[in-house]
Amino acid sequence: MIQPLVKTNIKSLNLIHQGKVRDIYDIDANTMLLVSTDRISAFDVILPTGIANKGAMLTQMANFWFEKLKHIVPNHLTGIDPISVVNNAEDKAQLGSGSLSRAVVVKKLKPLPIEAIVRGYLAGSGWKEYKLHGTVCDIKLPTGLQEASKLPTPIFTPSSKAAVGAHDENISLQQCANLIGTEIAQKVAKAAIQLYTDAAEYALTRGIIIADTKFEFGLDSSGVLHVMDEVLTPDSSRFWPLDSYKVGSNPPSYDKQYVRDWLESIGWNKTPPAPALPDDVAQKTSEKYLEAFEKLTGKKLNA
């Protein structure tokens, strides 16, 4: 079995941030190196077990979408070969290559302090709120919708970015405007909905429903809005197989569900430290990520 890369150790560059999945290294005043590891988190806790090739799959899927959707809004990619910014064999090996490349060189942007969530179907916390109040993030929806119903139009439901270890909180459109300014908030909402709409239409042709997703945005030194971080991966989206979709029930998804189900089954209290995953759970999760990657991109991971 492939040994997952759960932590990088790039000696050519200085580590400036380690997130749940990505390790970020400083290159110069304008650029950074993002390396997607095989780490996986559940219930906001990073697990000690990695998922084989997850970092490469996330990177290549995000790159696919960045290219496909670049007509809507600029993105953070520079086009610089990641291998060119490190200078020893061990560092280069950690970045991967070809379809197994797990790194990108990106622009340094000023991140906006929100997550731009777009929902096209009624699921998860949105379904729970709708059952109680007929709303999703206080947005009134038609009566009579069921779990997994397609919404009349996609809705923009931003959240504030929480501190490490805390949960993001849904915020109103007015709160979003207060945080980032009315003009930028309007641009973010328009771009996020268009990104989701175009991606969702394409994904249907590949047998996948994108029920909802989240985007992150930042501004360059000229104030131009860019989409950044990752886009439309199983980590940032809820993907459902079209052939098993049925209104009125929660469809299976291409994501961490095997992990969450196993953690629930053992009664873990959802606080650190997280338990190690059994090999079969890690393997099934890797297979789900791979299935989504191949369906959406039409590519093989080892091509």
Image (cartoon, rainbow, N blue to C red):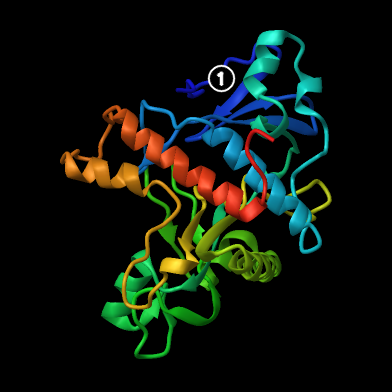
244 or 52, nearer to the observer: 244
Q: Is residue 241 above or below residue 54?
A: below
Q: Which residue is mark 1?
A: 8
How far from the left and from the top, in percent, is residue 280? 32, 33
Residue visible at 62% across and 55% down in the picture: 296
Residue 165 showing in the rendered view: no
Q: Which quarter of the rendered picture does the C terminus lie within?
A: top right
Q: Quadrant of residue 27?
A: top right
186 or 252, nearer to the observer: 252
How far from the left and from the top, in percent, is residue 141? 43, 85
How far from the left and from the top, in percent, is residue 36? 58, 33
| Relative horizontal placement of residue 237, taking residue 205 as reference (left or right) | left
128 or 97, nearer to the observer: 97
Residue 222 showing in the rendered view: yes
Tag 1: residue type? Thr
Residue visible at 44% across and 42% down in the picture: 163
Residue furthest bottom as drawn: 143
208 or 236, nearer to the observer: 208
